[in-house]
Amino acid sequence: MRIARRFLLAAALAAPGLPARAAIALTDAAGRRVSLARPAERIVLGFNFEEYTAVAGPGAWDRVVGFNRRQWAINRPAVWRHYLPVIPGLESLPDIGAAENQSLSAERILALRPDLFVIHSFGMRAQPDVMAKLEAAGVAILAVDYNAQTAELHRTSTLALGAATGQGERAEALAALYDARLQDLLVRAARATRRPSVYVEIGSGGPGTIGNSYAGTMWGRMVQFVGGLNIAEGRIPPGFAPLPAEAVLAAAPEQVLIVGATWANRPGSARAGYGVSEAEAQGSLRPYMARPGWAGLPAVRDRRIAVAESGLARSLMDFIGMQFIARQIHPDLFGNLDPVAELARWHRDWLPVPLDGSWVASLA
């Protein structure tokens, strides 16, 4: 009788016309329940390409049928060029537009017949009409959120990507590594007896332009997390905006961090990342020291001015950016950390490309 019941139950579940039970059910970074019949086989990526690559592992891009080209090939060209040789067909992969400039196209996405669309939470909110069309067509939408820079959303995003791609164990290992590194930073920062003042500025415009600083987010949040005093807090609205030159001089920061990258067509910008030598990164910092009034800043007098690559914020490897900041402002507490070696291990263990270039550098 027991065998017969099992047979009837199995037959009923397999009968045509009855709903199949989903093999994968997960919660994404937006708190939504997402169901997939199996690990996704046709994936469209709207953001977080390196995070997807790290979590989905070898062969991750064999399943990608379209992506947001602007966010990678145009906004981060050196990173793009570094990945081109190791991802066959990347150059010719269809472009689906970008939520960042409202060009995301539901029609282009649906033409690729995806079973999963991965997008950051901001992008999901930015174009709700596109999301509605995809959901109506039966495409599963997975929201990830590394931008908020909270341990909880980092973990949720990583585990959701792992579940959706059939890489649950890999995702668990990555989440555990992130949690451990973050906890180490938190424990050490709690021992600080003072909070050295830090000024952060994005260096895309070079020293002749006052770039955005950060309050409560991105680099500003990272400074606060590791025991620094971000001078932009309370001086600009929450988010990012330029901090007036006179405010920087009045605050007399003990440390200056310039956010660098390999921006295209940006002569004089702060440099860091793939293909950038340490000498080039350091050289891009020196003109900042000649800004009007900066010679008197404690940070400039002591040459405590540094550059870090922009991709070390709002990412699965942002703990490495925090390690670098922590070493700069609290060498007594974090001096034995080696963020460059950590970044090399990250590339070796989780990415298909080797570490190349100078991602962090200091004049100290």
Image (cartoon, grey):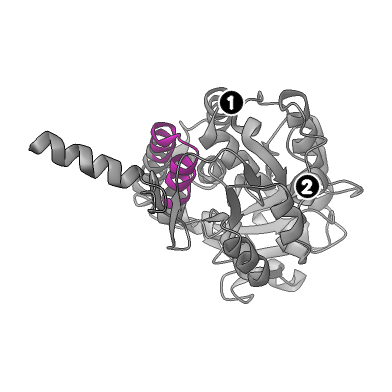
In this rendering, the answer to whether 344 lies above or below 105 is above
Magenta stretch, main secondary structure class: helix
Q: Position of residue 88 (x, y in %)?
A: 74, 26
> Along the horizontal axis of the image, is 145 left or right of 174?
right
- Upstream in the sequence, badge 2 or badge 1? 2
Residue in front for this viewpoint, 218 or 51? 51
What's the mark number on residue 69?
Answer: 2
Q: Residue at x 84, y 56 (%)?
A: 205
Residue 41 falls in image quadrant: top right
Q: Residue 164: say if magenta.
A: yes
Mark 1 element type? helix
In this rendering, the answer to whether 77 lies above or below 250 is above
Mark 2 element type? helix
Q: Residue 163: say if magenta.
A: yes
Start-end of magenta stretch? 156-175
Residue 274 falls in image quadrant: top right
Q: Position of residue 320 (x, y in %)?
A: 54, 39
Q: Position of residue 169 (x, y in %)?
A: 39, 32
Q: Nearer the viewer, mark 2 or mark 1?
A: 2
> Along the horizontal axis of the image, is 127 left or right of 73?
left
What's the mark number on residue 344?
Answer: 1
Q: Residue at x 57, y 43 (%)?
A: 321
Q: CA gap, disc 2 to disc 1?
A: 26 Å
Residue in front for this viewpoint, 180 or 2? 2
> Along the horizontal axis of the image, is 21 left or right of 10?
right
What's the mark number on residue 73?
Answer: none
